[in-house]
Amino acid sequence: MGFKPIGKHLIAGEWVDGPSTFEAEQVSGGHLEYAIGTPELVDRAAEAAEAAFPSYSALPRAERARFLERIAAEIDARGDEITEIGCDETGLPEARLKGERARTVGQLRLFAAHIEKGEYLDRRHDAAMPDRQPLPRPDLLLVQQPIGPVAVFGASNFPLAFSTAGGDTAAALAAGCPVVVKGHSAHPGTGEIVAQAIDAAIKACGVHPGVFSLIQGGNRTVGESVVTHPRIKAVGFTGSLAGGRALFNLCAARPEPIPFFGELGSLNPMFVLPGALAARGEAIGKAWAPSLTGSCGQLCTNGSLAFLIDGPGADAFVAGITAALAAIGPQIMLTRGIAAAFHKGAAAQKAVPGVKVLVDAPVEERSAGPVLLETTGEVFRTNHALQEEVFGPFGTIVRVRDAAELKAMAVAVEGQLTTTLHMDDADTALAKELLPLLERKAGRLLFNGFPTGVEVVDSMVHGGPYPASTNFGATSVGTLAIRRFLRPVCYQNLPAALATGDLG
Ligand code: NAP
């Protein structure tokens, strides 16, 4: 292997050992050892982040942009080594790691360009009205300011784009906030080499070293001590509902509660409307398969729930998806633990009375093939277990009686990252009734497509009502993601001598 991890934490420019180690499994065989994080190491990193805040947040935006661009260049310079260790840790294919790296450096460059434009500062100025009666109005200026050190938790399934230098880190650094990353124990080596790239950029740009630290995991107390550290002012989290909720609760229970921006799981329901179902039910069913099984279904945007009105169109849809899934064999999962959780979660839903198993690939140790279930609207509505995410290549088809029950399903589903309408012109009236229901349920509404694949652009919303995320009105992807790490400050009668930089 080209890159040999040293297995240490990076704290403010120094590689630091821990008192003990944990093992990370390599797909190619064997294990590598990494230092376990501790609350003491978290404390060092958080204090260094606080020390970096005054100078980093005051850097001219153009300099922060150069820093982000340099991180992107340093990641690209290590591209082959990142792909190699990333594949070996996660089992994801090479093309996926390469694509994810392109997205990661693209995000960093997008934020660099975004902060240079300055629109994100959302400057609002109300000029003084000294002659206003009965009282004069003062001069008022609103500018968004960075909130302070941010903690970032990445997810197992995006070792690059939602991890060490992923979207949360890029958004926080762009906003002017130092970052403490809690490394993911499923890809510590990938975390280390990306941290090395950030460290190189810090040194090249002469930025305060406390602006970035990586504390490896291996122990749940690391994450707990990161979110409860008094220097940390917000958390960007991508991961499971259970983990996110536990950390969200800790943030809320702090003496000084802080925002916890948790991007959690989602079923991404599709509603196949009657016109589309009758015209092309089989084709829609067939086209669903890559969204259900891509990356072994280990995507927050994998489509795993389809609602359709019972009848010949529904039969054709089922024939389409079951035929497509029959051609897809088992794939390796991100970790043994995730594979075990997949098999357990699928078994629990298969056991719900009224659920029929349509596709059931044989269980293997660290791999999984597709599982597809079918049930009725009544069973879905009365069994909350069927709304729990089974992270992997897992799908459920819900056959409902009529359009009224289809609308009842739109009301019954919990918050989602996305929802989709498959529709033809003949479905417009029903779609108009569903739209206001679904707008309350998801951050992104798709038409005649599949939810996998998230564009990183100004107009993207990746976040939805709880339990899809704990964010109110926020996104973790796209330029609007920077808003999570900013706070509006209003300056009343700011003296001209202080009106410099972003206040000028
Ligand atoms: P995870 O098990 O929740 O882990 C995420 C991070 O949180 C890890 O660093 C983990 O530490 C830590 N953690 C989890 N529970 C904790 C607890 N109780 N106390 C302290 N730390 C805790 O999730 P994952 O397996 O990495 O990711 C898969 C999940 O992420 C799926 O549900 C998927 O849908 C979701 N996801 C969502 C998005 C999105 O944008 N909405 C994107 C990708 C993935 P360890 O390292 O110790 O495990």
Image (tube, grey):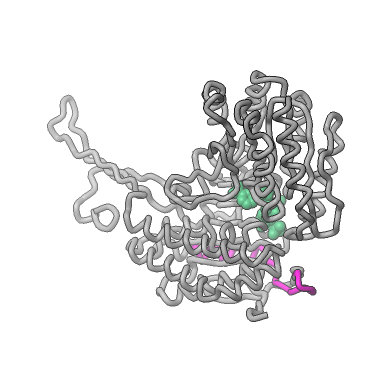
Residue 43 magenta: yes
Instruction: Decide: is 309 above or below 482.
Output: above
**Residue 244 makes an appearance in the image:** no
| Residue farthest along the front direction in this orientation | 279
Q: Residue at x 76, y 55 (%)?
A: 338
**Residue 287 makes an appearance in the image:** yes
> Which is nearer the eye, 200 or 213?
200
Instruction: Decide: is 150 above or below 74.
Output: above
- Total count of labels: 0
Q: Which residues are magenta?
A: 27-49
Instruction: Decide: is 385 above or below 93.
Output: above
Taking the image as shown, residue 377 lies to the left or right of residue 131, namely right
Residue 416 magenta: no
Instruction: Decide: is 365 above or below 251.
Output: below
| Residue farthest along the left direction in this orientation | 131
Q: Residue at x 74, y 74 (%)?
A: 32
Give x and y (percent) for residue 437: 56, 26
Dividing the picture into quadrants, the one containing residue 173 is bottom left
Q: Where does the N terminus fall, quadrant-wise?
A: bottom right
Taking the image as shown, residue 98 lies to the left or right of residue 30, namely left
Q: Residue at x 56, y 38 (%)?
A: 448
Taking the image as shown, residue 213 lies to the left or right of residue 265, namely left
Dividing the picture into quadrants, the one containing residue 497 is bottom left
> Which is nearer the eye, 218 or 139?
218
Give x and y (percent) for residue 495: 21, 50
Give x and y (percent) for residue 144: 37, 48
Give x and y (percent) for residue 470: 59, 41
> Which is nearer the eye, 354 or 240?
354
